[in-house]
Amino acid sequence: MHPLRQSLHNELHARPSLYFDEPAHVFHLAFLGSDQACNAFLEQCCLGTLDLNAAQGITQLDGHALKWERHAEFFTLTLVVTSSSDDLSWTTLPEVLASKVEVHLPALINSVQIVVRGETGLDLSRYGFKDPSGSCVGGGDAMVWSDFRLSEEGNNHMLFVNRRLNAYRQGRMIRRLLEIETYRMMASLSLTMAKDLSAQLDAFDKTLVTLSERNADPDGSNAKALLADISNLSAQVVSSAAKTRHRFSATQAYAQLVFERLGELRESHVGDCQRLGVFIERRFKPTVRYCTATEQRLEHLAESVANLGDLLQARVQVEMEEQNSEILKSLNARADAQIKIQRAVEGLSIIAITYYLLSLLKLGYSGVHLLGVEVAPREAMLVMAPLAIGILALIVLRIRKVKEH
């Protein structure tokens, strides 16, 4: 058997719900924190054997069912305090749990209290909702109300009225409501980051416009300084993208879970109230869209900076090619001048050689006379002329062979 077969198969049972059919208070807390913080809390409040490598677990706390779940960047606690009466109202977190979570309150990201009761004797006004939203869920087998306003204790209150749900369906329905609120808060974590990033992007856009104008300026010749500024802007954009990529990706993932859980509620209208799903979508979607738009804006800015760098490199390359062309033209002109000078020097050299050769022949002719040999000038000319021409021809051929070599 593959070593991962059992753990992968058990993922189907990794997130069970708490099942109950009595009226109850459900307290749900979500804390940002690592596995170490989660383990420290679990060791403090959970009794008996505890598997710290598990993703979730259900235990008992002062006789009440307590479920803990470990997620990628947060962990949740769900405490169910059942009652025998439907006459339930809002209450505070039980002291047995409040004392244990007090040290973790700075990391509290979500706190939901759900009152679960039957429909008999329901008086919605006693729960203090201001302009509540309400829905029939589960095909009309239950009703949910909330005004999505935080209480003085920082809790989001929900009223869950069970009509015809058994313990299993009720547990799953309440779990969906808790997941909607928790994932909605986790998705909204990037809103502040997106707002801060928008101010930076405005500055980046202005810098990009300035650099683009400098690059388009035909009189701008300091390409090295421009390239340094573009590289600096690119480094800042890439750094911002690296810092925010994970948060924006998490927002998309959490938002998708929220919308999926809303669809699983199978809502319908109850009275004249606005449905919970409509309320959440109309106020939550703008947050998701703003974060998505900010992420896309950052990506487009990074592409624009990269394109500007490519344009600058292309312009510099063209300028270098033009400079190389001018250098080649000057080298060709210099080579032509050298060839002309060389030809002139060759002509002068032949003239000088001819002069010295004739002078040597004249000296030879004079020497012959001194030796007493009478040679007529005509005969001397007939002898020396072919000799001089032959010598000059040999010299010219030798010069050409040297040049060809």
Image (cartoon, rainbow, N blue to C red):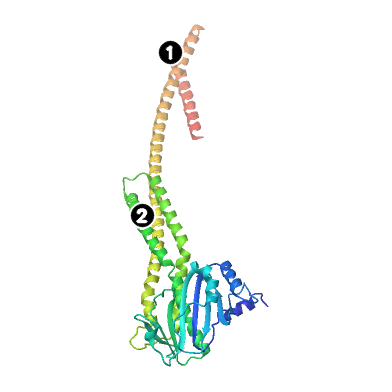
Q: Which mark is residue 377?
A: 1
The picture quadrant where one finds residue 239 is: bottom left
User: At x 45% / y 23%, what residue is drawn?
Assistant: 389
Check disc 1 and give the amino acid type: Pro
Residue 295 seen by the camera? no
**Which residue: 40% across, 29% down?**
341
Label 2: which residue? 208
> In the picture, which quadrant includes the N terminus?
bottom right
In this rendered view, identify the residue nearer to me: 290 or 88.
Answer: 88
Whole-percent x, y for residue 129 in the image: 37, 81
Q: Which residue is pictured at 38% across the width and 63% down the height?
A: 195
Q: How many dots with numbers?
A: 2
Compared with 389, 61 (above or below) is below
Closer to the camera in the image, 346 or 312 = 312
Q: What residue type is labelled 2?
A: Leu
* Secondary structure under the numbered disc 1 in the rendered image: helix
Residues packed near mark 2 inside 10 Å, few (<14), some (14 to 19) or many (20 plus): many
Crowding near the residue tagged with mark 1, few <14, some 14–19, many ≥20 C-alpha atoms within 10 Å: few
Tell me what residue is drawn at x 44 percent, y 12 percent.
Answer: 376
- Of 246 and 269, nearer the camera is 269
Q: In this view, does 78 lie above or below 268?
A: above
Residue that protrudes farthest toward the front in the picture:
95
Disc assigned to residue 307: none
Which numbered mark, 2 or 1, is in the foreground of this view?
2
Q: Which of disc 1 and disc 2 is earlier in sequence?
A: 2
The answer to whether 392 appears left or right of 48 in the picture is left
Element type where label 2 sits in the image: helix
**Mark 2 → mark 1, Cα distance in angstroms:** 94 Å
Image vertical order of residue 304 relative to residue 319, above or below: below
